[in-house]
Amino acid sequence: MTDEPATQDAAARRGVVTIEDDGRQRLEFRRSWPDPVEDVWAALTEPDRLARWIGRYDGTRGAGGAGTFVMTQEEGDHAGSPMTILECDPPRRLVVEWEQEGAENWRVDLDLWAEGGGTVLRFVQLLPAGADVTDMALGWHWYLDMLDAEISGRPGPAEWDAFVAEVGPGYRPA
């Protein structure tokens, strides 16, 4: 494999939204790296690496663990949100849910598997029927590009406004 992720171009890195039978929207991203599953898992779960791409989790680790998650790049109050680890099967599956004030809780499923000598990540979040998924998709796309920088050592995405100008049109309806 090359040192470039298999899903390097912006169109391939874009999240895909499908509609579930119950009307909820499934936002899914796939990313891949030439690195072993264990290294990608470490970037998703080790506190120092997690902090470099998305934020901080303070709490009990492992399935059933609970604590507080702070997304370090978000504006405003950084007190964090309560988070529960619903599933944890190292280094293959992590499912977390964190409370959102005034909105449906966020549940994110992260699955890893080896493929072609590297690792594939599938990121899934289910969103309410009819929700505007654009901002959520853009945000997760940006964070997953930050994860790529953590794993690969390549530069991270542009600052938010420049990132939205570059990638955002791909998420807007035609």
Image: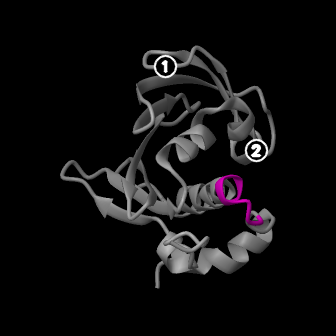
**Residue 86, image quadrant:** top left
Query: Label 2: few (<14), some or many (≥20) within 10 Å?
Result: some
Decide if residue 135 is on the left or right side of residue 108.
right
Residue 171 or 94: which is nearer the viewer? 94
Disc 1 is placed on an element classified as: loop
Q: What residue type is labelled 2?
A: Arg
Query: Label 1: few (<14), some or many (≥20) within 10 Å?
Result: some
- Marking on residue 52: 2
Residue corresponding to mark 1: 62
Decide if residue 124 is on the left or right side of residue 103.
left
Indicate the position of residue 149 as horizontal and vertical percent values. Answer: 70, 59
Q: Residue at x 48, y 47 (%)?
A: 37
Decide if residue 151 is on the left or right side of residue 131.
right
Indicate the position of residue 125 as horizontal and vertical percent values. Answer: 42, 47
Residue 55 or 39: which is nearer the viewer? 39
Magenta part of the chain: 149-155
Disc 2 is placed on an element classified as: helix
- Point out the tag, 2 or 1, that comes first from the N-terminus: 2
* Numbered marks: total: 2
**Residue 109, image quadrant:** top left
Residue 38 or 76: which is nearer the viewer? 38
Do we see residue 130 in this rendering?
Answer: no
Residue 36 in the image: above or below residue 165: above
The question of residue 152 being in magenta is answered with yes
Q: Residue at x 53, y 64 (%)?
A: 134
Q: Residue at x 45, y 36 (%)?
A: 91
Q: Residue lying farthest bottom? A: 174
Indicate the position of residue 19 as horizontal and vertical percent values. Answer: 28, 59
Do we see residue 22 in this rendering?
Answer: yes
